[in-house]
Amino acid sequence: MSLKMAQCCTVASASRRLSCRALRTCSTAARASAAIDRGPWWPPPSTERPAQAEGNKRNRAKQTRFPASRPSRKRTIGAPILQEPSARTRRNLHLHPNPTYRICMALTYHPKAGEIVLCDYGTGFISPEMVKIRPVVIVSPRLRHRNNLVAVVPLSTTPPNPALPHHCSITLAPPLPKPFDNPQVWAKCDMLATVSLARLDRFRVRTSAGRIYVTGSVSAGQLRDIRCAILQGLGMGSLTVNLP
């Protein structure tokens, strides 16, 4: 009985070996036929050195984890931060049509009431406020504990249309330097402003001896007319009778 069982087990193992061998033969034949179909060049030979192949493998793995198409965190968090331009850049963005005139140096002295200088309205003001360089007349005296501030009224060479009580016509003798050399100017007294001396500069004039710095002026009577027009612009025209 045991002999028959041993013979059966031997036959079964032999049949299993034959079947496994047949499967291996079939798979080898299938691979060979696939290689014949692809051609003798399949698979392509590798031309990479071992170290280079290892480095390329690491790079491919890194690209898989961190694809290049994914935006960085800097681009996804809010808008880009813009650097604020310097004071000199902001001044140069609001030049007068004549590039000779721009505020390059603040006044180093406190101007007197009635003196005419240049004022740069280009920084810190928004249209319809004054937003360019204009000649202005100083209308305030020097006050205690206010050394670097003055009240100014802008001057224009274009007549207002229509002319209102807060506009004051002035005839300058001598006129201001070019391009403000019109002898008749208009004080826009409704646009009274208190500005820093850093916005003010003198007129620059080229002469045969070189460049010189000058200022204009108005008479005492003209300054009084300007102050009366300021009160009209403030809605306090009844106070004009009290002006000296």
Image (spheres, helix red, strand yellow):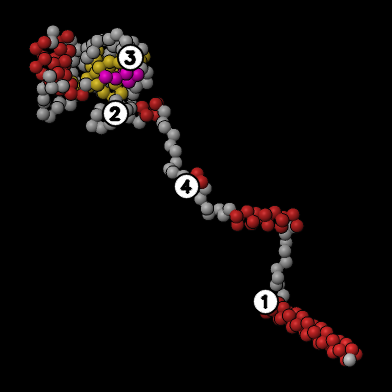
Q: Quadrant of the N terminus?
A: bottom right
Residue positioned 63% across, 53% down in the render:
62
Q: Position of residue 209 (x, y in %)?
A: 35, 12
Q: Nearer the viewer, mark 3 or mark 1?
A: 3
Q: Is residue 136 left or right of residue 75?
A: left
Q: Is residue 207 left or right of residue 8?
A: left
Q: Residue furthest front?
A: 1
CA gap, disc 1 and disc 4: 47 Å
Residue positioned 11% across, 10% down in the render:
242
Q: Are marks 2 and 3 in contact (CB under 8 Å)?
A: no
Badge 4, how many Cα within 10 Å: few under 14, some, many 20+?
Answer: few
Q: Earlier in the sequence, mark 4 or mark 2?
A: 4
CA gap, disc 4 and disc 2: 34 Å
Magenta residues? Answer: 194-200
Give the SS element for disc 3.
loop
CA gap, disc 3 and disc 4: 46 Å
Q: Which mark is residue 76?
A: 4
Give the SS element for disc 1.
helix
Q: Position of residue 58 (x, y in %)?
A: 67, 54
Residue 70 visible (yes or no): yes
